[in-house]
């Protein structure tokens, strides 16, 4: 099994059974989700900001306006924590106490680097676009150099990484197993609804396959 | 309009048009989502951890094992940032550069307080259970005192709070409006799938209404 190196910081403090450093497991979570929560500190105050991301090999890319405080802060190379969470279901136990959720999450610790070359910026933007909706990049107008220059792209190396997963049924007390209430898991999933055409978009243009066949 | 007080820390640094301090807007986002990402600092390193939560009036409750590092850290009254994000859709522009997402997010800054009284702990657990799946509390086995004692419940007052929202169609450059590609929004929504009965649950027990009629 190919794994990320376990460090003091990424060692789970409890529920070790839920933790994993398996590379393929980490990749699959990062590739299925598309919004992360980035945590960083400004003058002692932690901030947690949602943003899109994409993985290319062992790099996580995030991007945005060069005026974004989050990106400008992270560009300084401060410590960051990027967390990605997929909620797979509600775990409904017989006791209130043992209610839980099934989830898969990844925590990435490290320091981001500014992507300077326009070609890597462009490759990152392609990955970001196609990660949100595969195949979209090829059909849209690609970025102008001036747009690439106005975009701050950061690269966070996947080095200090861990995943945490809960799956399966509720775990009740033995003494509650006969309690007369339904127990089990209610699976949750994200679906797309009917695409909403921009009113400025020519009705003769068909909905592309990447939109009509979208699934997460 | 009843609003949260805007502070230096909760003032958006850009895109002020997307920010709001409206109390009802903040409440509606907090009440629709059920997983937050809590950010805190340990020895200079920010950590971002997903967890369930519930709102009761102007308090946000989170809870977990008294052995949890996150909860033990937050229980010390350190600065915390709790962020809640709902992704409403993919914004598909004509240019790669103007791709975006529609979302609603809330950021809560502050310091958590430990809930000590068993009655407030119990009320918080009820809110946490019924926030995830309304009506569940009444049908399950309520918490024993020993379970309440093993649970660390924290209260984060909703004082320094802001919301950020993007809605609507893509905003493309005027010069791209005739670009021959579909543009619009692909709405996303979380749905429940068929409930999975615990193999230890008597098949004669019907699926309760809170499960069969669940919607987010």
Image: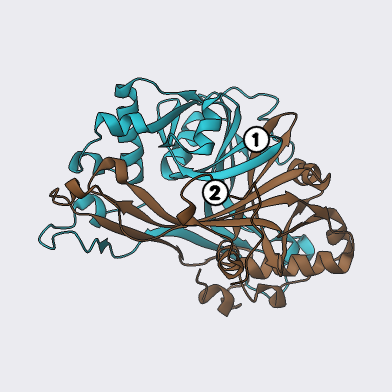
Chain colours: A cyan, B brown
Q: Is residue A45 above or below residue A60?
A: below
Which residue is disc 2 drawn over? B12
Foreground pick, A64 / A29: A64
Where's the N terminus of chain B, which quadrant?
bottom right
**Residue nearer the viewer, B92 or B215:** B92
Instruction: Determine which of the numbered discs, if any, sits on residue A41 in the image.
Output: 1
Determine the CA span between mark 1 and mark 2. 16 Å
Residue beneath the point at 55% across and 67% down: B25
Q: Is residue B138 left or right of residue B207?
A: right
Chain for disc number 2:
B
Q: Position of residue A112 (x, y in %)?
A: 52, 26
Whether discs 1 and 2 lie on one chain: the answer is no
Label drawn at residue B104: none
Q: Describe the element under mark 1 as helix, strand or loop.
A: strand
How many marks do you count on the picture? 2
> Residue A39: percent from the left, percent from the top?
60, 38
């Amino acid at each position: 099994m190919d794994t990320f190196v376990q460090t003091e910081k990424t060692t789970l403090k409890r529920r070790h059974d839920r933790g994993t450093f398996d590379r393929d497991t980490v990749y699959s979570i990062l590739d299925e989700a598309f919004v992360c929560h980035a945590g960083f500190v400004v003058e002692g105050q932690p901030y947690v900001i949602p943003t899109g991301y994409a993985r290319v090999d062992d790099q996580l890319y995030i991007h945005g306006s060069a005026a974004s405080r989050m990106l400008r802060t992270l560009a300084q190379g401060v410590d960051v924590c990027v967390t990605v969470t997929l909620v797979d279901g509600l775990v409904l136990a017989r006791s209130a106490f043992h209610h839980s959720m099934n989830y898969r999450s990844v925590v990435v610790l490290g320091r981001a680097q500014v992507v300077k070359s326009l070609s890597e910026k462009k490759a990152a933007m392609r990955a970001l676009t196609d990660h949100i909706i595969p195949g979209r990049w090829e059909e849209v107008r690609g970025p102008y150099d001036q747009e690439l220059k106005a975009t701050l792209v950061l690269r966070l190396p996947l080095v200090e990484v861990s995943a945490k997963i809960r799956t399966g049924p509720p775990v009740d007390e033995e003494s509650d197993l006969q309690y007369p209430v339904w127990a089990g898991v209610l699976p949750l999933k994200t679906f797309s609804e009917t695409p909403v055409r921009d009113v400025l978009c020519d009705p003769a243009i068909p909905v592309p396959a990447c939109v009509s066949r979208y699934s997460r």
